[in-house]
Amino acid sequence: MARFRARPMSTFDVINPATESTIGSVASHSLEETDRVIEKAALAFESWRKVSPGDRARLLRRFADLVDTHQEELAQLEVANAGHTISNARWEAGNVRDVLNYYAGAPERHSGLQIPVEGGINVTFHEPLGVVGIIVPWNFPMPIASWGFAPALAAGNAVVLKPAEITPLSALRLGELALEAGLPEGVFNVITGSGSIVGWRFVTHEKVAKVCFTGSTDVGSRIMAGCADQVKRVTLELGGKSANVIFADTDIEMAASRAPGGVFDNAGQDCCARSRILVERSVYEKFLEHFESAVTGFVVGDPQLETTEMGPLVSDEQRRIVESYVPEGAPIAFQGNCPTGPGFWFPPTVLAPVSPTDRAVREEIFGPVVVVLPFEDEADAISIANNTPFGLSGSIWTENLGRALRVARGIDSGNLSVNSHSSVRYWTPFGGFKQSGIGRELGPDALDAFSDVKNVFISSES
Ligand code: NAD
């Protein structure tokens, strides 16, 4: 891990959450160093914006190819640094490649309009914004970074990217691969450090034109307020408390067998985790019976093993937060297993019966803890699902297509799946309602969030 040692004034240790051993140390950059990187990006932007769309596309494809040839290395970094299961980590590195390839197709297609008007014509251009600051959380370090940097670069912006303090390794490696792919020096910069120094500087520095933030709602709302001072563009992808709504007409055994994957994937450290399971009352007991065998059979352990379905929590601090939602006397219906000994382990935990006012029902836990609540009918299901300040994701299990559509339209959430728990497909838009965020990432329109429209009138009369 020696290559991650810089000439830092200060550093922080990087810990393997499955073993608690220190696997490296990275620089905690100062305000002055952050300013230097932002200035460097601002300078690089002036040339990058002039690179032809075809050449920008070629460079992004080369970057994607290098991510592809380093997929296993990147995946191993994520297993070691974030405790992700190897199968998830391979998917995540593959997702970065796919997102880069997808947006490599965008620069040549990001054209404007021509609008005939009296006395001439108006043409529109999508102008890049400048330097885009991307702030990434620790739960999915690679994909979330790429959902920002790939479209930002494709649109002609320079990027400064700050990974989370505790999971910087894959982002640093992606920065190296970008250079190796031929992206000009200064166009894509990864800078490690604390949120309050490096991250906040993206908000206050006048040469950062946009902040693309993924993280907690608390920090996100402060970033939005800070950006308002300069009317700085901002995209926020924040927390969630999503519902998995199970109607009696679905195959209950199947819905129960799939429910653990919807909430315990990545040890529940997923903004889209379906952490509230709502079950139609007539099948509530039957669901719990099948759910118990699915939860107790969920394989928690060494993230290096391909058979493992859930690894450790990312840090001791995160484990303490999760534990606080399962105090002595908590209504634990049943729990799965997890290793003992070193590592930040927490077992899959099901809380029921619970009251709508319980903390575990209202707050984002960001760990492998799920609550199960009964509902009476469609209207009740929608009302409970919407009884949260969040609105990011959710699932609906029913064999009735009309009901699926009615409930999907009724739930105030940005990304819903019917008879599935999938949330993110890079060629479709992703983002939250209410306090889950503002703006959308991914999908065909992502470049619009990284550019401004310029409207030029050309007179035909002179
Ligand atoms: P966090 O808000 O604590 O930190 C996220 C990032 O912001 C980190 O890089 C951190 O260093 C930085 N940061 C912290 N304080 C800052 C400040 N004052 N100024 C600028 N940057 C600052 O979140 P976390 O604990 O790393 O991640 C978990 C949260 O992220 C959860 O709430 C989760 O739901 C959310 N999340 C949302 C999505 C989504 O797409 N909606 C995806 C993943 C995670």
Image: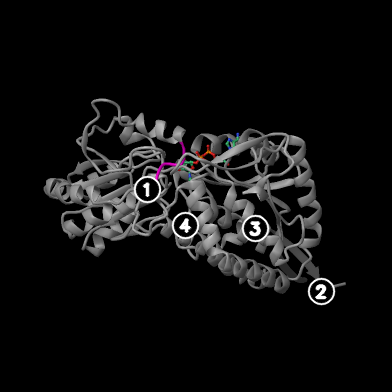
Tell me if mark 3 has few (under 14), some (14-19) or many (20+) residues whose alpha carbon lies within 10 angstroms of its own: many
Q: Dividing the picture into quarters, in which one does residue 255 lie?
A: bottom left
Question: Disc 3 vs disc 4: which is toward the camera?
Answer: 4
Check whether the beta carbons of the residues at disc 1 and disc 4 lie within 8 A of each other. Answer: no
Predominant secondary structure in magenta? loop
Q: Label 1 amino acid?
A: Ala
Q: Give the range drawn in magenta.
A: 311-315
Q: Label 4 amino acid?
A: Ala
What's the residue at 65%, 70% (across, down)?
A: 62
Image coordinates of residue 14 in percent, x first then y, are: 56, 41
Sequence-wise, the earlier of marks 4 and 2 is 4
Lateral position of residue 360 relative to residue 98, left or right: left
Q: Colour mode?
A: one colour
Q: Name the residue under label 2.
A: 460
Farthest residue, direction right:
462
Please give the label number shown on residue 450. none
Tell me if mark 4 has few (under 14), some (14-19) or many (20+) residues whose alpha carbon lies within 10 angstroms of its own: many
For marks 4 and 2, give the CA distance: 57 Å
Image coordinates of residue 23 in percent, x first then y, are: 56, 44
Question: Disc 1 vs disc 4: which is toward the camera?
Answer: 4
Instruction: Determine whether the residue tagged by mark 3 lies in a helix, strand or loop.
Output: helix
Tell me if mark 1 has few (under 14), some (14-19) or many (20+) residues whose alpha carbon lies within 10 angstroms of its own: many
Sequence-wise, the earlier of marks 3 and 4 is 4
Instruction: Determine whether the residue tagged by mark 2 lies in a helix, strand or loop.
Output: loop
For marks 3 and 1, give the CA distance: 27 Å
Please give the label number shown on residue 273. 1
Check whether the beta carbons of the residues at disc 3 and disc 2 lie within 8 A of each other. Answer: no
Q: Name the residue under label 3.
A: 152
Question: Disc 4 vs disc 2: which is toward the camera?
Answer: 4
